[in-house]
Image: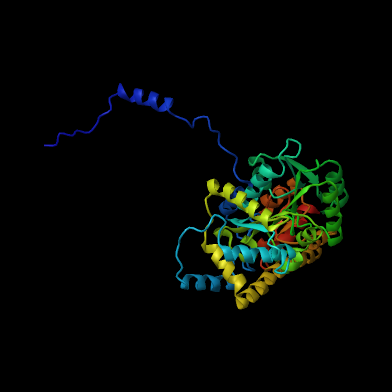
Amino acid sequence: MSLLRPLRFTAAIKPQFAIVAQRFNSWSAVPLGPPDAILGITEAFKKDQHPDKMNLGVGAYRDDHGKPYVLNAVHKAEQLVVAANMDKEYAAITGVADFRRLAAELAYHPTATALQDKRVATAQALSGTGALRVAAVLLNRFVCTTPETQSVWLPNPTWGNHIPIFQDAGFKVEKYRYYDSKTCGLDINGLLEDLSTKATPGSAVLLHACAHNPTGVDPTQEQWKEIAEVVKQRDLKPLFDMAYQGFASGDSDRDAWALRHFVDVGFQPIVTQSFSKNMGLYGERVGLLSVVTGSPEEAAAVESQIKIIIRPMYSNPPIHGARVAAKVMSTPELNAEWLVELKGMADRINSMRSQLVQQLADEGSIRDWSHITNQIGMFCYSGMSPDQVAQITADHHVYLTKDGRISMAGVSSENVGHLAHAMHAVTK
């Protein structure tokens, strides 16, 4: 017979356990955090059973049937990577070397003087978000080091995640005027005034390289020159967030024009790149952080400090997605196919913009919707008010953020008519 007997809890013992549990409960004071706005929209969309429902909140590309799209070039590259039967050892702290080189060439151009002179420090990062987080720590630790300069100026509005990324890195977040709600376009005068009179010299300024998120409003090349001049005069430290290179216009060189102009006129910017949109590598978390410096020695020093930041944060990045991206960019046939597919994605979104404007007119709308086609990239600031957004969701089952931002990737030839009808109904 076993000498072990099951432990039985008497009525007297149970309260004692409750007291002990309460004494050692470290988490009772943790409040429930607010839900993510985009995920909340997606959850509401999933619960809706209406056959014509539309989800225009998620920032991920969809094909003309509303399905996730894996690029052919990426699929072929992945097969080549798997067939190579490479090991799964840790990457270096700064990631896959071939990917870093090729991604930097995509951003700056293969013949860029800064690259030829080995003045650019690079590190593979956890897509654009991870690159921004490391960049923020680097800026805070070595560039914006005084109480007066530990501010980052963000466009108003900007991608929502920019704010907590920089706040968590110790920055005070300030905003410069960007979007003009009256014209649904760029408030260039307000932008220049804020940066030239309000931004503290030596503080950081974040610039969307192309396809501004969430408005889709980009400066012209002449306006970028004006912005560069103000940033120079005010001695601001530019950080370019480039999440949509090639995806905005379909031309990766055109989309990198602003960054390259800043480098050409002498700036030493920090640049964050994401390959989520332009290669569809969302879940692979593929990105690059790069910093233009004044010499190879400076680049080596900056890279060493980036390693020190990354090591306790996530040690090193994942290798598979970076290998796939590198294979696409380094194989001539795959690179050519990728660029064609990239332009195809951009063209589809631009086509949806044009069709939406035309069908709004067909519905009888007399409003000026030209801003929809003037804007660029994945997102469109529709100009709808929060009340109109609530109405279009309640009455027409169209889900989007309350600021009226439409993810054009969710619009297709199958549902653009429904969207036009719904928008006209709530705005007439």
Q: Quadrant of the C terminus?
A: bottom right
In this view, the residue farthest toward the bottom is: 333
Pinpoint residue 108: horizontal percent, then vertical percent.
72, 64
Which one is nearer the viewer's eye here, 225 or 27? 225
Q: Residue at x 56, y 59 (%)?
A: 95
In the image, taking residue 238 as reference, residue 342 lies left or right, namely left
Residue 269, by quadrant, is bottom right
In the image, taking residue 411 as reference, residue 220 lies left or right, namely right
Q: Is residue 285 visible?
A: yes
Total marks in image: 0
Q: Residue at x 71, y 40 (%)?
A: 145
Q: Is residue 247 visible?
A: no
Which one is nearer the viewer's eye here, 15 or 311? 311
In this view, the residue farthest toward the left is: 1
Pinpoint residue 31: horizontal percent, then vertical percent.
55, 33
Pinpoint residue 105: horizontal percent, then vertical percent.
68, 66
In this view, the residue farthest toward the front is: 297
In the image, taking residue 15 as reference, residue 355 lies left or right, namely right
Q: Quadrant of the N terminus?
A: top left
Pinpoint residue 194: horizontal percent, then vertical percent.
84, 44
Name the colour scheme. rainbow
Residue 198, by quadrant, is top right
Q: Residue at x 78, y 63 (%)?
A: 257
